[in-house]
Image (cartoon, helix red, strand yellow):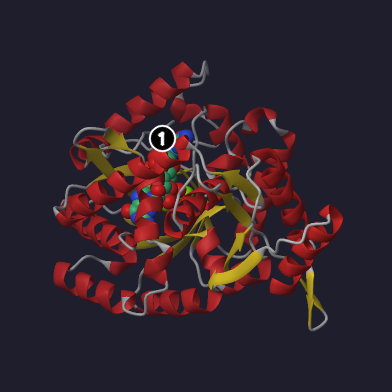
Amino acid sequence: MSERLSGFFADVAAKQQRTDNVTIARVGGDEFVMVIPNEQDPERLGKLAKDLLEKLCVPFEINGSHVNIGASIGITVFPNDGKTYEELLINADLAMYAAKERGRNTFALFTAEIAESAKTRLALEHDLKNAVRTKQLSVQYQPTICCKDGSIRGVEALARWQHPTLGNISPERFISIAEETGLVREIDRLVLQKAIEDIGGLMKSDLDIVLAVNISAAGIEDPFLVGEIAELIEVTGFDPTRLELEITESVAMRDPDSVCKSITGLRKLGIRLAIDDFGAGYSNLATLARLPFDTVKLDRSLVSGLASDREKQTIVKLGLTLASELGFETVVEGIEKLEELEFVATFGATFAQGFLFSPPVPVGELSTLLQPARLREIARAALKKHGSKAAPVAHPTVRVANG
Ligand code: C2E
Ligand code: MG
Ligand code: MG
């Protein structure tokens, strides 16, 4: 890597007949700093970054194998973006993160907007810490419906954060901050405890459902996770066979061995495991088959626009067939339209989840929702909204259970 960087700048210097040297330093595991003297023009710096990214994209040959790497570059210019080395470095770091957010293999020049959004983020980070410490986060529940008979299979617990001045902050936003700051383990714990308390309470009144809870990468890779959950189950008396932990596809593929250790331990406790957001990223099929999951959740990005997108239809069909061949149950996420439900039910989906049935709701509303008569009403309303003339109970593949 360092050879490639110094080679690149040596070529640039030779081409431009410059004698002032670029300083290159490795400042972290995979982070390099380059100080380019006498260059302040943003356009030329951008061009340089682009050329460098192209050079870095060429696969490395290591022991006969080809290894690809990606890079993100953040650029600051002296003296506009900082007058000291520290200031320039901090701002280059912010620009680099902005580049990462735009996607891999790209660069960003430091701007006032980047500075502003970093300030907002820092404030959010501070407020999130406070919210976790004072247990301000709440949990909502979204039902999962059986495609065969319309009965409720279970609920997924989803974290919610109502910020005192900014209002509702989406989990996508605060979970990613929590992941970067190490708070996510604490959030997972809070959600799991609260969900077991809420749903355990409902289940005492004879309701037989599965409670699904999301577990972060930091959680599943933590060797203490299994012991912690074993203790929680013991203390609360929650039936472990009614608990399903969801791990996203990208996490499961990141370090299959450590994931395998945790999930083997969790399975020994009787807990079910699901692979979440399947189809959203890159999956190694051999690894997937080897990991002892019970359920595969097809990502909602595969479902949006499904009715008119032949390519998506093929992918969903293949995903459902593959999961069922490998012995997994399936949940298709993001079902918003009746046609989507019809499609996935026809091609063998076991369960469906989405706004068609219900958005995530607080536990108080959930207990009303779980009454079969109420569900029938929702299904009828959904059918009406989507212009179907068929009564829900007469539907060939999806039927709502009689109360
Ligand atoms: P997820 O686990 O895949 O959860 C499903 C997400 O899809 C939820 O978003 C839900 O509100 C949304 N959704 C459900 N049905 C529909 C639909 O029909 N259409 C559309 N457009 N969206 C639908 P939410 O609540 O915003 O959560 C986003 C993600 O944040 C979750 O995705 C999960 O990965 C993460 N998350 C939420 N709570 C927790 C938690 O307690 N711990 C961890 N580690 N992650 C969490
Ligand atoms: Mg999930
Ligand atoms: Mg998901």
Q: Farthest bottom residue?
A: 63
Quadrant of residue 118 in the image? top left
Quadrant that contains the N terminus: bottom right
Q: Position of residue 235 (x, y in %)?
A: 15, 72
Q: Position of residue 75 (x, y in %)?
A: 58, 49
Q: Which residue is mark 1?
A: 400
Q: Farthest right residue?
A: 15
| Vertical position of residue 305 compared to residue 240: above or below | above
Q: Nearer the viewer, residue 371 or 261?
A: 261
Residue 396 placement, left or right of 218: right
Q: Position of residue 24 (x, y in %)?
A: 63, 67
| Vertical position of residue 35 compared to residue 300: above or below | below
- Helix, strand or loop at disc 1? loop
| Vertical position of residue 73 compared to residue 369: above or below | below
| Vertical position of residue 37 compared to residue 138: above or below | below
**Which residue is painted at 53% across and 18% down in the image?**
388
Quadrant that contains the C terminus: top left
State which image quarter holds ligand 1.
top left
Q: Nearer the viewer, residue 180 or 260?
A: 180
Q: Position of residue 122 (x, y in %)?
A: 32, 48
**Which residue is painted at 23% across and 38% down in the image?**
163
Residue type at mark 1: give it: Val
Quadrant of residue 164 in the image? top left
**Which residue is painted at 59% across and 70% down in the image?**
25
Asked if one can make out residue 83 in the rendered structure from this viewpoint, the answer is yes
